[in-house]
Image: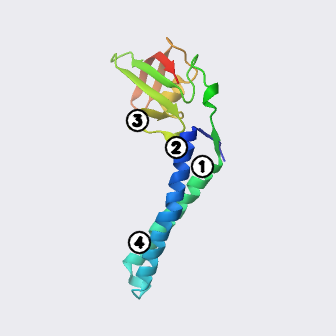
Amino acid sequence: MAVTYMSEEGLQKLKDELVYMESVQRPEISRQIAEARDKGDLSENAEYDAAKEAQGILEAKISQLKGLIASARLIDESSIGTDKVQIMNKVTIRNVKTKKDMTYTLVSESEADLRSGKIAVNSPIAQGLLGKKVGDVADIKVPSGTMTFEVLDISI
């Protein structure tokens, strides 16, 4: 299993989600299954089938989350520098063509949230920025072609 690097906050969020799934969602689905079972003939009981399917999906998610937590390695944020782009850095870049500036924080895949400016370190843009320094220009292949970005700032 691959190691997943993440922040303490990101790991805690995953642990909280796991507790919720196990202590709230799992008992709720079990209750739905029991309720549907009490209604008689299971061969034509859509509620029972739906509840069993939901249970299977939930158990798969729980298993996946447990694996992610087990493979998680905390990033020592005190050792993160700003001399070149790396995970946990906040990077301000300029699209050379459109002159539009954007700021992203490079995070683990499980912590990525574009709305809050957090992109996965394994995304094409993040991969193209890793190791770059302020002033460097990067040609990055994205699904729509190649984009050129200039690194304006690197911070924590």
Q: Is residue 32 left or right of residue 9?
A: left
| Element carrying mark 4 | helix
Check disc 1 and give the amino acid type.
Answer: Leu
Check disc 4 and give the amino acid type.
Answer: Ala
Q: Which residue is mark 4?
A: 50
Check disc 2 and give the amino acid type.
Answer: Ser
| Mark 3 or mark 4, earlier in chain | 4
The residue at the point 51 percent across, 19 percent down is 154
Assess whether mark 4 and mark 3 are in contact (beta carbons under 8 angstroms). Answer: no
Q: Which mark is residue 68?
A: 1
Check disc 3 and give the amino acid type.
Answer: Ser
Assess whether mark 2 and mark 1 are in contact (beta carbons under 8 angstroms). Answer: yes
Residue 24 visible in the snapshot: yes
Q: Which mark is residue 110?
A: 2
Q: Is residue 11 left or right of residue 101?
A: right
Q: Residues within 10 Å of mark 1 (few under 14, many from 20)?
A: many
Mark whose residue sits in front, 3 or 2: 3
Q: Which mark is residue 116?
A: 3
Mark whose residue sits in front, 3 or 4: 3
Assess whether mark 2 and mark 4 are in contact (beta carbons under 8 angstroms). Answer: no
The residue at the point 55 percent across, 46 percent down is 12
Mark whose residue sits in front, 4 or 1: 1
| Element carrying mark 2 | helix
| Mark 3 or mark 2, earlier in chain | 2
| Mark 1 or mark 2, earlier in chain | 1
| Mark 4 or mark 2, earlier in chain | 4
